[in-house]
Amino acid sequence: MSDKIKIELKAVTKAFGSNRVLDELYLSVPEGKSLVVIGGSGTGKSVMIKCILGLIPPDSGSIMIDGAESTGQNHKIRAEFMKKFGMLFQGAALFDSLKIWENVAFGLIHGHGMCKKEAREIAIEKIKAVGLKEQVANLYPAELSGGMQKRVGLARAVAISPDIIFFDEPTTGLDPIMAEVINELIVEQVKGLGATALSITHDMGSVRKIADYVAMIHGGKIIWKGAVGDLDHSGNEYVDQFIHGRSDGPITRRLA
Amino acid sequence: MIQEAGNNIKTINSISLILDLFAYIGGSIFAFLSAVGRLANFTGRSVKHCFTPPFFPSQLLRQLIDIGYYSLPVVGMTTLFTGMVLALQSYTGFSRFNAEGAVAGVVVLSITRELAPVLAGLMVSGRVGAAIAAEIATMRVTEQIDALRTLSVNPFKYLIAPRVIAATLMLPILVLIGDIIGIFGGYLVGVYSLGFSSASFISQTWDMLEYMDVVSGLMKAAVFGFIVAIMGCYHGFNSARGAQGVGAATTNAVVSSSILILIFNYLLTQIFFS
């Protein structure tokens, strides 16, 4: 793999009222690598990923995708950036009114102008690739379990063969076995596509499975970044407390 | 000395109270203007996306059926019984002045000009406006709208434009059918309950009816359909998180569209008939 930087955030700041969620955050993701951002609830992980996707505009700072500035661009240029992205949402975010194959084929048909027949074939291929039976294609999201919905969400995220895939808490709410299955599928799909992956999660099992690099966000900044192998001897007390789930340490949580 | 200090404190308290009142009034006016600005911006963007490609014909067809076809029973029942009640009530009133012959005219004018468009608008607001707000708010809460964006689809084009076009087109059709059913309701009561002859009721109805009576009602209906869709979409799209947010979006959509329908009904009547 090259050392080219695929995603680069420079001094990205985002506040909601007086709450400064991202505070001059710097982060870079090398091409073809999987970076996982860890951090407590409410530390700005989701806001960061939504800023990169263009769903929330940052207040200031720069977000570069493939060396090109993505913030403050018009809809046409933004749409071109979007075509590079795939996203697995925390709750899968499948469209209730559409069948499973239509959900998976949605980006191909509406985003890339592919004909329905061809898109359906690719959708069914992706549905099988995430371990679901072909018959599932004609069901509606409400007829599937949480784990199956996550698999469909993954199939939808990879259906357009994106350059960059984002995973928002991919294993939240799943039992340990299903979480492991989803992690394996993520690794398989990301490696298969040769894509760059940026994930956010609390699940340390997931981190160790899918990450090449890990970064920790706290107080709106990245306070540590390193290879996944360095996680257990990071020398950072915040990281140590987080990965071991200790209640005592520098990360204090106001309970009331 | 102590009394003077006490008086000063009272004066300061009074001034502070007045300033708080002004701050509250100013804050409310600012919040209102800000909400009007947001709504105007949303409406402008929605209208723009109704006329610019890409279009989603399958979504439009679905909305035409949902808003038009499935609202037909509600609108039909409402106008049928309104026409029937109108015939009964106007007969009771006019019989005091020996003017029973005006019943057919009152029914046809009231239904076509006012009752069919307004009642259909209000009923569709309750049925369709609430459903639009709830569906879009749920999509917002469950990140489906974000998912649309990540799949390179503009939610204004996919969600808002088909609903706005469908409601604006279908409400006049519903009102036209409601006109016919409402007048038929008046005819049923007039002929079978009040003893009018069928021929005279029909001829009085026909003589009284003018082209503009129906057209004005249909134009009102188009405006009301637009209002219902825009308010449903606006409140759904800007819904707060959680079940409470979805509930509030639904309530706000129905209440605001109902009030706007009544306000615009007055304004349009003033334009058409003053």
Image (cartoon, coloured by chain):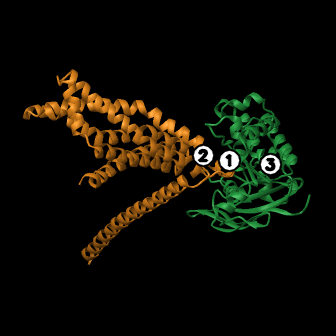
Chain colours: A green, B orange
Q: Quadrant of residue A122?
A: top right
Which quarter of the figure is the N terminus of chain A placed in? bottom right
Rate crowding at label 1 as few (under 14), some (14 to 19) or many (20 or more) other CA atoms within 10 Å. some
Chain designation of label 2: B
Camera-side residue: B149 or A191? B149
Q: Say which residue appears at 30% left-offset and 54% top-offset.
A: B267
Same subunit under labels 1 and 3?
Answer: yes
Give amino acid for label 2: Phe
Secondary element under disc 2, as helix, strand or loop, is loop
Neighbor class of circle 3 (other Cα within 10 Å; few <14, some 14-19, many 20+) is: many
Can you identify the residue that label 3 sits on?
A: A161
Whether residue B45 sits left or right of residue A156 in the image: it is left
Residue that appears at 58% across and 51% down: B157
Q: Nearest the camera: B39 or B244?
A: B39
Q: Residue at 21% of width from left, 29% of height from top?
A: B201
SS at badge 3: loop
| Amino acid beneath label 1 | His
Frontmost residue, B105 versus B31: B105
- Residue B56: which numbered mark, if any? 2
Tally the numbered discs.
3
Q: Residue furthest right?
A: A1
The answer for how far apart the CA atoms under marks 3 and 2 are is 24 Å
Give coordinates of residue A223: x percent, y percent: 77, 62
> Which amino acid, mark 3?
Ser
- Would residue B170 appear left or right of A142 to someone viewing this image? left
Q: Secondary structure at mark 1?
A: helix
Q: Residue B90 at x, y = what percent? A: 17, 34
**CA distance for labels 1 and 3:** 15 Å
Q: Is residue A10 above or below residue A119?
A: below
Which of the labelled discs sits on residue A110, or is there none?
Answer: 1
Q: Check if mark 2 and mark 1 are on a common chain.
A: no
